[in-house]
Image: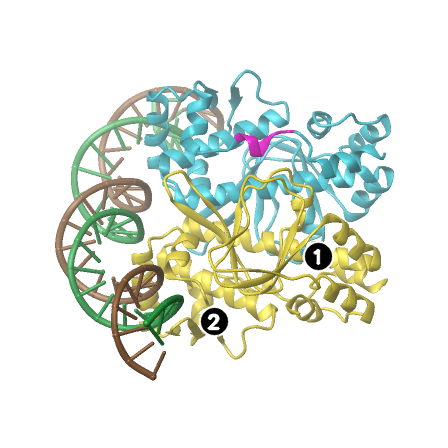
Chain colours: A yellow, B cyan, C green, D brown
Amino acid sequence: MPLVRKLGQFAELTGVERDALQGLGSHPRHARAHQELRARGGAAGTVILLHDGWAIRHRTLRDGRRQIIDFVVPGDLCDPSSFVGGQRDFTVSAIMPVVYTLLQPREFLDLLSVSPRLGAFLWWLESREAFFLRAHLVAIGRMRAEERLAYLIWELWTRLRFNGMALDHTFILPATQDMLADATGLSHVHVSRTLKRLEHRGVIQRTEHLYRIIDADGLVAIAQVDESLYSNELPPFVRALLGRQ
Amino acid sequence: MPLVRKLGQFAELTGVERDALQGLGSHPRHARAHQELRARGGAAGTVILLHDGWAIRHRTLRDGRRQIIDFVVPGDLCDPSSFVGGQRDFTVSAIMPVVYTLLQPREFLDLLSVSPRLGAFLWWLESREAFFLRAHLVAIGRMRAEERLAYLIWELWTRLRFNGMALDHTFILPATQDMLADATGLSHVHVSRTLKRLEHRGVIQRTEHLYRIIDADGLVAIAQVDESLYSNELPPFVRALLGRQ
DNA sequence: CGACGACTTGATGAGTGTCAATTTTCGTGG
DNA sequence: CCACGAAAATTGACACTCATCAAGTCGTCG
C-alpha cells in the first residue's frame, strides 16, 4: 500500500499503525479514466485516499478553460482538511483507471484514536501539499513556459520519489500534454514544443509516457527549485510528536 | 482586535476565549513598510498574527521576478501549519507600517488547552486560506488580465468583509499597482490599463487607494466566482465541534 | 524647489495562443 | 493478431495578449 510505503520513509511505523492504515484500503472502489471521483460544489466531508492510478484536482471555467490544481498520485490523501471545509471548490477526476477509498470522518477519527501521532504526521503531509501549491503558484505566475514545465516535471518526480515510485531518475507520467498544459497554464501546442526543447537541451528524455531525468541539476536550476526546502527530514516539532508514541 | 472580530462573526465566543485571544496581542511588535517580518529559508516554528496594517507573503526569483502568494490583512494568522512545516518557502513583508505578534508553538498550544474548540475554528480558517489559494491559482493559470484583477479585488474585498473592514462596498487597498501586478502575474503597466478599463465599465471606482465596488454582480461574473462556496456558514463538522464547548 | 516614487500613456515587440493539417499512437472490435 | 477509427502529438503559419521600453504627469517629502 503506497501510503504505508510513503509514511515508512520518514518514521518507523508500529505494527498497529501499519494495520490501521492497511485497514483503510479494505473497501476499495474502482473508477475508469475521466470519471469524476468527486464533483465540485458538493458538500464536503469525505477524503479520497488513492491506492493506484493517477487523478487530478481541477476546476473548469464556464467557457471550458480548465486549470489543474495538482496531480494526485498513489498514496496521496486528497485534502484532509475538507472535513472542516464547507463546500468543494474543485473536482477530482481519474485520468486513468484508479483504485481508491472514500474515507468518512469517522474512519479518520478512529485512525487518530488508534495512533494520535499519525495526526501530526498527516498534518505534516498536508503542509507539504500547501508547500507544493505555493511553488506551483509562483511557477504559473512568474515563470515562462520552459521553467514552468521544468518545475512541473521536478515536482512530479519528487512526489513519486516520496512514494517509492520513481527509481533511478525514471518515472511514468500518464498525463497527456493537454493535461500538462492545463496544469501549467499553457496551450497543449506550446507544451509539445517546449518539452521537445527540454529534450534537445539534454535535460530530460521521453519515450511514450516514460520520463527520464538526464540532468537533474539542470532541471533544478531551470525551475529555480530550492531543494533544501523539500528534504524528507521531519521537522523537530513533528519528530517530537512522533517520539512520544 | 481584528481576530476576535473575525471569529465573533461565526460563533459566540465565551469570555474566557475572548480573553485568551486578546492575550495574544499583549506584546505587539512594530515594523515599517517594506520590512521583512520573516525571511524565506529560515527554520519554521513561529506564526505571525497581524493586528494592524497589511503584509504580503511572497517569493522573489533570482532575476528579480516576484510572485506575491497572497496579502495578509489585519486579523489574519499567517499559516498555522508552519509549526509542522520544516523550512520557510516564502518571505513575509510589511507593505505599510504594521503591528503584529510572533506566536511561539507554546502559546498556540496554551490557547488550545484553554479552548479546544478554537482548534477546530483555526483549522477551518486555514482551510479557507487553501480555498483562496486554489482560486488564485486558477485565476493566474487560466484567466486573462481583466478577470485576474476582478478576482483579486473580489478576494480582498471578501477577506476584508470577514474581518469587518469593508463597510458599504468600499475598502482601502494599500497595495501599489506594482504589487497587484506581482500578485496577478501581470506587468504594472498592464495593471494600470486594466484597472482603468474596469472603471470605465462601471464595475469599480477608485480614488487614491480607496476602492468601491459599483457592480458587485458584474465583478463576480467577470471573476467567475461561485459565491456559494464562500458563505460564512460554518460547516456541520465544525459547528458540531464548536457546540460541545 | 528638486528628487523620487507611483501612476499613466503610447509605441513596439516577444512569448504564447489559436487554427489547421499531418503523423503517430492507442483502443476497440472483428 | 490485425484493422480501423479516435485520440494524442507534432509542425507550420498567423494573430493576439501582454511585456518592455520610454516619456511624461502628478503628488509627496525632504
Separation of marks 2 and 1 at Cα, in angstroms: 26 Å
Q: Chain of mark 2?
A: A
Residue bearing mark 2: A172
Depth check: B35 or A211 in front?
A211
Residue at 68%, 28% in the rendered image? B6
Q: Are marks 2 and 1 in contact (CB under 8 Å)?
A: no
Residue that label 1 marks: A122
Rendered image: mark on residue A244: none
Image location of residue B56, percent across then percent down = 55, 40
The disc labelled 2 sits on which kind of residue? Answer: Ile
Q: Residues within 10 Å of mark 2 (few under 14, many from 20)?
A: some
Mark 2 vs mark 1: same chain?
yes
Q: Which residues are magenta?
A: B227-232
Residue plotted at (50% across, 54% down): A35
Which residue is painted at 69% across and 32% down in the image?
A: B234
Disc with the residue nearer the chain's start (2 vs 1): 1
Q: Quadrant of the C terminus of chain A?
A: bottom right
**Residue A148 quadrant:** bottom left
Residue A163, position as x, y percentages in the image: 61, 69
